[in-house]
Image (spheres, grey):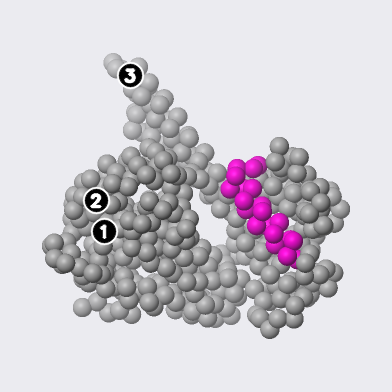
Amino acid sequence: MTNPAEDVFGELIGQDAVVAQLRAAAADAPAARAGQPSTAMTHAWLITGPPGSGRSTAALALATALVCPTGGCGTCEECMLVRHSSHADVEHVIPEGVDYLRAEADALMHSAALAPTRSLWHVFVLEDADRLTEVVGNSMLKSIEEPTPGTVWILCAPSAQDVLPTIRSRCRHVTLATPSTTAVAAGLVSSLGVDPAMASFAARASQGHIGRARALATDEAARLRRQDVLRIPLQLGDLGSCLALAADLVETVNADAAAMCDPLDAREDAALRAVYGDGAQGKGLGTVERRAKGAFKDMQERHKRRRRRVVRDQLDRAIVDLIGFYRDVLVIQLGAHTELVNAEMRPQIERVASASQPPETLLRVDALERTRNLLAANVPALLAFESLTVTLKDPSLASSGAVRRDRVTG
């Protein structure tokens, strides 16, 4: 019998009700696979929750429990294979671009038609189901609604409303909540051995985002990048400084994306060249070269999509950090008895708060949210952030429409 304190569901922080539901599904899964009536287990799940609440952790925990002989012990060969992304019956899918492509959906449906090879279930964990466009999502409806026996779909998204109605209506919905900072800090201490003071800082600064908290607790570079972002409100001066700050941020994000993507691109390039016999000679080489040309073109497009996604995610993280800063400014301005997200910066936050009024702070938060929408609409990042920094300096420009709108929307 698996010890609940040590099984795969133990990695979920502050989600007791969800853990109970997923454990019940895993316990009922063998009976459901045998064709017996089941109320706890189903073939399609939609797991939603705020960023960092543990959506993918919950999805992978359920997937692991379904292929584990004892319901997710966390230590057997099946569990270890899932943990290392090498289990033949668990496919963890993350879109390489901003949206899922039709070719990705076609490959998924082909794979979903195959029976499991070593387990009772063939499980598909789809991250960012909100990135399924209407055309791509609707093409997958039949596979999700009437899957091959033994196939389970587990979709993840920020909220049910972000997912196509035709898809969410075919899934059992599980909702995660943002874990408390106390729970996140305790999890960092127990799972990673992080110093309690650092764990407390990371939990608070991440605003309950577990993945972000782990990065801040263990990676000094992540902490330094966050500090650079939070200095932006303190360095806004004339127009030139605003534009320079925007350029510096975008340049840093692009450099970080290159550092993350370049090694992956190089490994995939080398692997594909090996497949097509780089440097080979002989009969039939012309046919091979033509096929290789198409394969390399497809690979380069995947690399571009992946890089765009990394850049967008990094920029969004910067926006979230800045929203947290101005949330703290508003807390000070309103005299609310609430813990600051950036408590270590209280003197700087108080200085910004004393130099403005709550309506101006709200306009600045609105500008940050508007920037997220501009990035989602594929507005060039530099133009979007130039508009943002100018508005953060003088939020009255937002209502007057004078913030370089001709360049941002042109």
What residue is at 37 percent from the left and 60 percent from the top?
Answer: 46
What residue is at 75 percent from the left and 81 percent from the top?
Answer: 335
Q: Point out the tag, 3 or 1, that comes first from the N-terminus.
A: 1
Going by the numbered disc 3, the residue's amino acid type is Thr
Give the extent of the magenta segment: 361-380
Check disc 3 and report the residue beneath it. Answer: 287
Going by the numbered disc 1, the residue's amino acid type is His
Q: Is residue 369 magenta?
A: yes
Where disc 2 sits, the SS reads loop
Check contact, mark 3 vs mark 1: CB within 8 A. Answer: no
Question: Badge 1: how crowded within 10 Å, few (<14), some, or many (20+)?
Answer: many
Numbered badge on residue 43: 1
Q: Residue furthest right?
A: 238
Q: Nearer the viewer, residue 336 or 321?
A: 336
Check contact, mark 2 vs mark 1: CB within 8 A. Answer: yes
Q: Position of residue 386 (x, y in %)?
A: 74, 48
Q: Main secondary structure of the magenta part?
A: helix
Q: Position of residue 347 (x, y in %)?
A: 78, 75
Numbered badge on residue 358: none
Q: Point out the tag, 2 or 3, that comes first from the N-terminus.
A: 2
Numbered badge on residue 147: 2
Which quarter of the image is occupied by the C terminus?
top right
- On the picture, is 91 further left or further right than 236? left
Tell me if I can see residue 246 in this picture: no
Q: Is residue 191 magenta?
A: no
What residue is at 40 percent from the left and 72 percent from the top?
Answer: 12
Q: Nearer the viewer, residue 228 or 65?
A: 65
